[in-house]
Amino acid sequence: MKTSSTLQTSRLIPATPAFILRAFQDPERLARWWGPKGFRNTFHEFAFEPGGAWSYDMHGPDGTVYPNKSIFDAISAERIVIRHLEPMHQFLLSITLSPEGEGTRLTWTMVFDSVEECGKVRTFVPRCNEENLDRLESELARLTAGDRELVILRYVEAPPEKLYRAWTEPDLLKQWFAPLPYTTPVAELDVRPGGSSLIIMRGPDGTDLPNPGVYLEVVPNEKLVITDAYTKAWEPSSKPFLTIVLTFEDLGGRTRYTARALHWKGEDRETHEKMGFYPGWGQCADQLEALVARI
């Protein structure tokens, strides 16, 4: 059987090439999504220009630190070429951005020094590259959010019905809804348009944080819309803060999960982000993924 020193991944992304390029050229944004699922980055040097050096540490989920050093060989509106120097495997990474329909065809091509070197990573690198593009799409969703919106996007290795159950069955929701060490002792869910929802989170010091709301839209296994503008149908709350729009897109056993927090005012959005929306809701999404993996 013929083998190759090349690995390639391609994906149609719903964004323009210029917009995708922004997620590469800003080191703060790039550090948030670069690498496989569960990894984080510390950048030491980043010169986004032809011949520019890029050195960084990748921190694995188990705490292992992987130092990396690369050079940007070429940069244009349609193509980025990165020469990876160390550690372990040397390769040339070419990322091309080609307009396709209303989006961009991103093609990720890795060329290794030899067939043998490529063979050593062929069993796991394609999966890691897909996870990397999942994280890129999550970052793009964050960048495209409106001035009153905050967004979490995840690709989850479970069918939509499992995520829907985790949002609509009280016993399941209690297991993941609050970012640990917070807990969720109460979940009263009347899941129908106009039905009320009362979720109480409890802090480590025992303080209870009630979250009353009402379901505006319910499409089983596809969509939920919940607002705190009402405490129950149809009694207005004293201070509406947000509406949550959840979508579960079926990808054949895998789900594109999007959670949008829509705020009444721009100031509310800023307040929510400063309160820790991204780390807090991100941790909850991690806990949700862990739960649906075992139910």
Image (cartoon, helix red, strand yellow):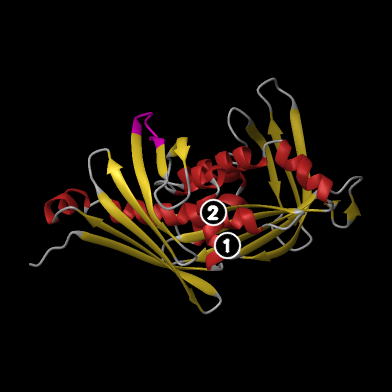
User: Mark 1 = which residue?
Assistant: 19
Residue at the location (28% across, 43% down)?
A: 85
Question: What is the x, y in percent for residue 70?
Answer: 35, 44
Question: What is the x, y in percent for residue 156?
Answer: 46, 54
Report which quarter residue 176 is drawn in: top right
Question: What is the x, y in percent for residue 174?
Answer: 60, 40
Residue at the location (46% across, 51% down)?
A: 49
The residue lying toward the viewer, choosing from 286 and 55, is 55
Outermost residue toward the front in this view: 51
Location of the N terminus (image quadrant): bottom left
Residue at the location (60% across, 38% down)?
A: 279
User: Mark 2 = which residue?
Assistant: 23
Residue 64 magenta-highlighted = yes
Task: State whether residue 72 is above or below residue 280.
Answer: below
The residue lying toward the viewer, choosing from 19 and 286, is 19
Residue at the location (49% across, 70% down)?
A: 104
Q: Identify the magenta region.
A: 56-66
Q: Is residue 157 visible?
A: no
Amino acid under disc 2: Ala
Q: Tell me the element at label 1.
A: helix
- Mark linked to residue 5: none
Report which quarter residue 173 is drawn in: top right
Relative to 86, 46 lies left or right: right
Relative to 292, 232 lies left or right: right
Q: Is residue 289 visible?
A: yes
Q: Are marks 1 and 2 in contact (CB under 8 Å)?
A: yes
Amino acid under disc 1: Phe
Question: What is the x, y in percent for residue 255?
Answer: 48, 60
